[in-house]
Amino acid sequence: MFFNLIVRNSKRSRKENGLFFSSLVISIVAFYIILSISNQDIMRFLQEMESDAVDKLLLLIPIFYIVTLCILFFLIYFACKYQLQRRKHEFGVYLMLGMRRGKLFSMLMAEDFISSIFALVIGLPIAIILSEMISLITAKLVGMGIIGHRFTLSLSAVLFTILGFLVIKLFAFLILSGNITRQEIGSLMAPISNNAQRQKPTFIYVFSAIFGIAMLVAAYLLAIQGIAWQKSSMMLLTLSLGILGTILLFYGMRALISLLIAVGKSNVPLRVFNFRQIQENVVQQSTSLAISSMLILAALCCFGAGIGIANTSSKLNAHILDYTFAVSTNIVLDKEPEPELVFPSVQSLLKENGLEDQFAKLFQIREGRINTTEKTDEVFVLDSVIDEISRLPQSKDRDVLLNNLGYAGFPHVICLSDYNNLLELAGEPTLELASDEAAIYRDSSSTNEVRNAMLNEILAKHPKAELDGKTIFLTGEVQSIPLVTDSSITLDIALIVPDEQFFYYTQGNYNVYVNGILDQNITNEMGLMGAYSTINEVLDMIDLDALGLEYESYLQSMGRQLFYMVAASYITSYLAIIFLVVSNTIIGVQFLMNQQRTGRRYQTLVRLGATYHALCGSARKQITWFMGLPVIVAAISSLFGVKSLFAGILSSEVKNAQGEMLVIAAIIILILCVVECIYMTVIKRSSDRYLLTLMQPQREE
């Protein structure tokens, strides 16, 4: 019978506290995914490509795990405290009927243990399946496909998930159960009191709200302008302004609610009661609401920035080329190979080692310096372009562009026919240049869309320039398709010129990069990674140094992109989930605790004739306001927070796609606001169940 009582109580507890139980399941899922990350196919692949970076990332996992355990301990302690307070009267009845305190303690521990086992039984299978799905989806996003995927179950992740979860759950419940069982029967049987705080003068709340908003605006300005990232003291100032501003804003919201009471319609049922309840709850819980809002802000920023960076990083440096062969820069040769012999040498190398059929196309990219003069500066004069840009409205991008063009006096030149091969592969229209025309090339890491748009506006006018004393006309739009597979060469500013002019200006002294495109049938049969791995194994067995050659493949670029994606999406999503779970559970539990403390007010309304539907409608409006206020503040702040993160942590190359990342971040933030609405619905249903217990007026002896 005692066992049946434990099972029934545990089942009832899970049903009545669905929000808390769901939060525990989500936490278990997050625990396993972050702990099992090293066993996933993607991380094993990255371990080979970016071993140092991956090792540093994996060293952070235990830190995240321990910090999360501490955060969840306080969440569990707070939520379980509410859960036990709701049952104080029940515990008092048990003791009055003769149950020993030790047996009551054992019952509470057993109930919690059963609930914990249920959470693990539900959470772990979901976590394992979700972990596999994430691994496959991430690989697909970077074009790897299913790379010999095999199911992996991380026993260590399962063990530490179970161990960590049970330890913090047990520790929190030991403290709470001990406190409950030590209380006197009279204390347990007494109704929960409502300790209302004394109201302060209105001007204090008004001043707090205004001063809080001013501090938040100052924090926003420091963040989005990048000032906060310049030194640690400025970052500390920004965070301090943001935290204090949020706390003051919530403390002063009582003035806003009073204003709403005064200007609203007076004929709405229970309207004044609703706002008085909200006003009292916000004032009493202003600090915890502010903290919850900041946790939601952190979750929105982590999700928005992380997924935005991951999604956009996978699109940068679009996959066009598979391999690039070039003259080795790692050794000193007695005699540099003739440029015209590099391409035949690569063809012979591939043919002799049975790799010729692996490539659908081989072509060369030729680039070099101006060799028609001994000067190394002021060979390229584009004063007319600089003058035109100087007349544009002043902006940071304009100043950066002017500075870049100021160092363009000795540019590289690129052979037109070679670059047209790249354009064809990228599906772009080819360039047609007269003998006195040239197009400007800029590496994507050196510029952005705004600067390119400024320069394109000038190029549309066909401006005149000089190249080694000869007049040329700049035409077309700025070109930025990568010349090689990965990082063999990066050109800030170069000129694309017709073939005849290229050979004239370089005087036969130029660099040759041989690019290769894999046969589609090979990649379809073996998969992209399989094809790279097979070819790399053959090439690594050849003494390329003896031939004066080296190579790079898209595998290096893929590994780097994938690492950024994993680091950005996995870690930020993990932190966001934890922050979101903790903040929403705290808000929900706070409201339900406040509702229980003021239960006699609802009973009074019942005696005055209020219906169950009216009470539920009243409570639901209170929940919407109580949860909506911190969510709205967090959502507004997140727009500035994400922008600030982009300003401080993005590389110059990724910053070029900042506009697209902001759009993605805004969409993610909107989706998370929908998640907040789901949380509200769960809390509203819990509130409805509690109000149902108050519908029968009770005698007061």
Image (cartoon, rainbow, N blue to C red):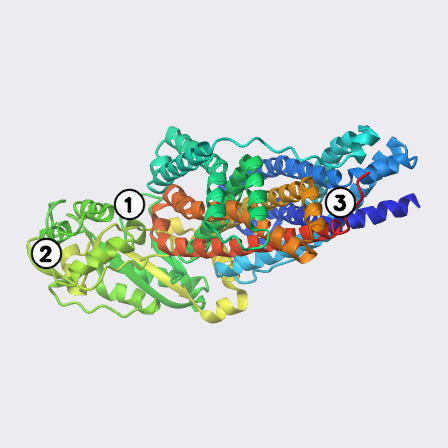
Q: Is residue 538 above or below residue 83?
A: below
The residue to which callout 2 is attached is: 465
Q: Are marks 2 and 1 in contact (CB under 8 Å)?
A: no
Drawn side of residue 533 relative to residue 513, left or right: right
- Is 217 placed above or below 556 here? above
Q: CA distance from mark 2 to mark 3?
A: 75 Å
Amino acid at the residue labelled 1 = Asp
Q: Secondary structure at mark 1?
A: loop
- Who comes first in sequence, dot 2 or dot 1? 1
Residue 265: horizontal and vertical position, in percent? Answer: 49, 54
Identify the residue position indicated by label 1 in the image: 334
Is residue 441 shown to the viewer in this render?
no
Q: Along the polypeptide, which appears first: circle 1 or circle 3?
A: 3
Tell me residue 656's x, y (percent): 33, 52
Q: State the CA–CA distance, disc 2 to disc 1.
A: 39 Å
Residue at screen point 18% across, 56% down? 508
Nearer the observer: mark 2 or 3; the answer is: 3
**SS for dot 2:** strand
Query: Which secondary structure lies at badge 3?
Result: helix
Residue drawn at x 31%, y 54% is 444
Check disc 3 and report the residue beneath it. 116
Whole-percent x, y for residue 693 in the image: 75, 50
Q: Is residue 25 above or below residue 501?
A: above
